[in-house]
Amino acid sequence: MESQQPTSYQAAIEELQRIVAEMQSENCSIDNLSEYTVRALELLKFCKAKLTATDEKLRKILDELESQQ
């Protein structure tokens, strides 16, 4: 299981999808569930931070546009 920061939002989503697929697989070992859950949480936090940062940037841009009118 990867433990480094993803390179992008898309990479994080793709890894999350792989984790979910593995967890739903009949071959998933109960011993790996904790590891998968921890990694999924890391990825979700990364995605949330990316979304929050993007939202803030967009709000600033929109505020600038409104102030110029």
Image: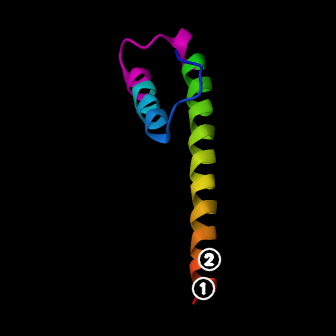
Q: Which image quadrant for residue 22? A: top left
Work out which residue is located at the far front of the displayed protein and give it.
68
The residue carrying pointer 2 sits among few (fewer than 14), some (14 to 19) or many (20 or more) residues within 10 Å by Cα, namely: few
Q: Residue 68: image x %, image y %?
A: 60, 85
Q: How many labels does the image show?
A: 2
| Residue 21 within the magenta-colored segment of the rendering | yes
Q: Relative to the observer, which residue lies in front, 58 or 2?
A: 58
Q: What stretch is highlighted in magenta?
A: 20-33
- Above or below, comparing residue 62 to residue 26 in the picture: below
Quarter holding the C terminus is bottom right
Residue at the spot x=56%, y=65% of the render? 58
The residue carrying pointer 1 sits among few (fewer than 14), some (14 to 19) or many (20 or more) residues within 10 Å by Cα, namely: few
Q: Which image quadrant for residue 34? A: top right
Q: Is mark 1 on a helix, strand or loop?
A: loop
Q: Relative to the observer, which residue lies in front, 64 or 19?
A: 64
Amino acid type at mark 2: Glu
Q: Which image quadrant for residue 44? A: top right
Work out which residue is located at the far bottom of the displayed protein and give it.
69
Residue at the spot x=43%, y=39% of the render? 10
Residues tagged 2 and 1 counted as in contact (Cβ below 8 A): yes
Q: Residue 42: image x %, image y %?
A: 62, 31
| Residue 24 within the magenta-colored segment of the rendering | yes
The residue beneath circle 2 is: 64
Residue 37 appears left or right of 14:
right
Residue at the spot x=56%, y=30% of the render? 40
Residue at the spot x=63%, y=46% of the render? 49
Alpha-carbon span between mark 2 and mark 1: 6 Å
Q: Main secondary structure of the magenta part?
A: helix
Amino acid type at mark 1: Gln
The residue beneath circle 1 is: 68
Residue 54 appears left or right of 15:
right
- Above or below, comparing residue 42 to residue 54 in the picture: above
